[in-house]
Amino acid sequence: MGINMERVLLAGFFLIALLLSGSDAKPIEVTISARRGVEVLLPCSLDSDMDPDNVSVRWSSSKDSFITSGLRVLKYVNQIEVVKMSKMEWNLLIKSATDTFAANYTCMADQKVLLSNVQLLILVAPKIDFGGTSSPVVNVDEGGTVELTCAFTGEPVPRITWLRGDDKQATGITGRKLVLRDVKRYATDVYTCRGENSVKNNEDYTMNLTVKFPVEVDVMEKTIKVMKGGVFTLSCFAQGAPLYDTYWIDNSGTKVTATPWKYKFVVEPVGAHVPAKFVTLETKPGTFTAHDFGTFTCVAEGEGHEARATVEVVELKESK
Ligand SMILES: *[C@@H]1O[C@H](CO)[C@@H](O)[C@H](O)[C@H]1NC(C)=O
Ligand SMILES: *[C@@H]1O[C@H](CO)[C@@H](O)[C@H](O)[C@H]1NC(C)=O
Ligand SMILES: *[C@@H]1O[C@H](CO)[C@@H](O)[C@H](O)[C@H]1NC(C)=O
């Protein structure tokens, strides 16, 4: 039998544990955590007053009754083995740990003498449990309460932390739920829950939260005075979630959504999260005539309604 270093070290560790526990025949009680795929040695030793040549030892598990009897393997043939590094030892070797082997194991001598109890935990990296997790797109009305939830499976039970933004800034919030009350539009962002345990493969799950609010428009100046042939700029700040079309209506009632010959039309997004835009209408030099004075209207379309704001463009007479 090929005995590798790890096994020898493990055996050595348990030997020391045994020596420390003395000879008052207390059964070994241990919990072993192992990753999937590794070799695991479950310790079992006879009490010092037992005759190693005249004893029979059996391993059983909480999942199966007996899995070994003496050196004979009764279940998981080829996957487990009884390993005796000395006459007194009856260790059980699991050649490659899988979830199947996560159980409580008992090593017993004749007359039901308990030699060891081993709890074997198979470490499992965190994995998102969609059953207990919010959908990746969450909407809430401004002023409402929203609960983002995340669930992870894993062994040990993963710890959950919450991060915010595309750059995943720590929020300091931990646990399954992130609760936002009286939520403001500025809370619109990407939220990530991260599951971590001692297995170093974190898992992240991301949700896009949108705080909905009715569209609003604001004009910078309500009245603009300009001379015939002059150049002016009309600026409007539109926000809303959702925010659909934004445009200006000129004094003749024409909707301006692109740059025609007379105007330059510009829509610039503002900020990364809250849907907001600057909607700008700029006259091109020499195009503005006496017919063009009047009311201009900035319009933002939202869900089921729109918002408007007007600007009066009045003639600035040359004072002589
Ligand atoms: C131990 O050995 C004795 C004889 O030396 C025998 O009578 C007894 O049955 C054996 N016990 C076991 C458990 O095998
Ligand atoms: C193993 O034993 C521990 C503690 O004794 C117990 O909490 C756990 O539920 C048991 N596990 C199984 C799989 O029986
Ligand atoms: C969430 O928002 C990001 C941009 O911040 C985007 O790249 C991603 O596709 C969105 N995810 C979903 C599910 O809408």
Image (cartoon, helix red, strand yellow):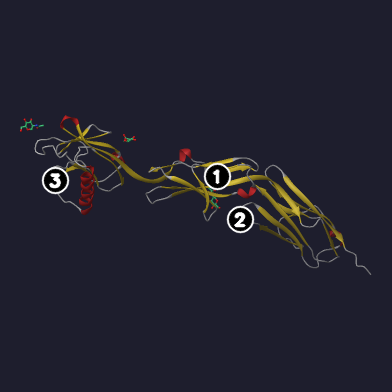
User: Quadrant of the rendered structure where residue 83 is?
Assistant: top left
Ligand 3 within 8 Å of the CB at mark 2: yes
Q: Quadrant of the C terminus?
A: bottom right
Query: Mark 3 or 2, which is nearer the eye?
Result: 3
Where residue 86 is drawn, which disc sits there? 3
- Mark nearer the N terminus (3 vs 2): 3
Q: Residues within 10 Å of mark 1 (few under 14, many from 20)?
A: few
Mark 1 highlights which residue? 137
Residue at position x 21%, y 54% in the image: 5
Circle 3 SS class:
loop
Circle 1 SS class:
strand
- Mark nearer the N terminus (1 vs 2): 1
Where residue 272 is drawn, which disc sits there? 2
Residue 125, percent across and down? Answer: 38, 47
Q: Nearer the viewer, residue 202 or 223?
A: 202
Residue at position x 39%, y 43% in the image: 154
Q: Residue furthest right?
A: 320
Ligand 3 within 8 Å of the CB at mark 1: yes
- Mark nearer the N terminus (1 vs 3): 3
Query: Mark 1 or 3, which is nearer the eye?
Result: 3
Where residue 46 is drawn, which disc sits there? none
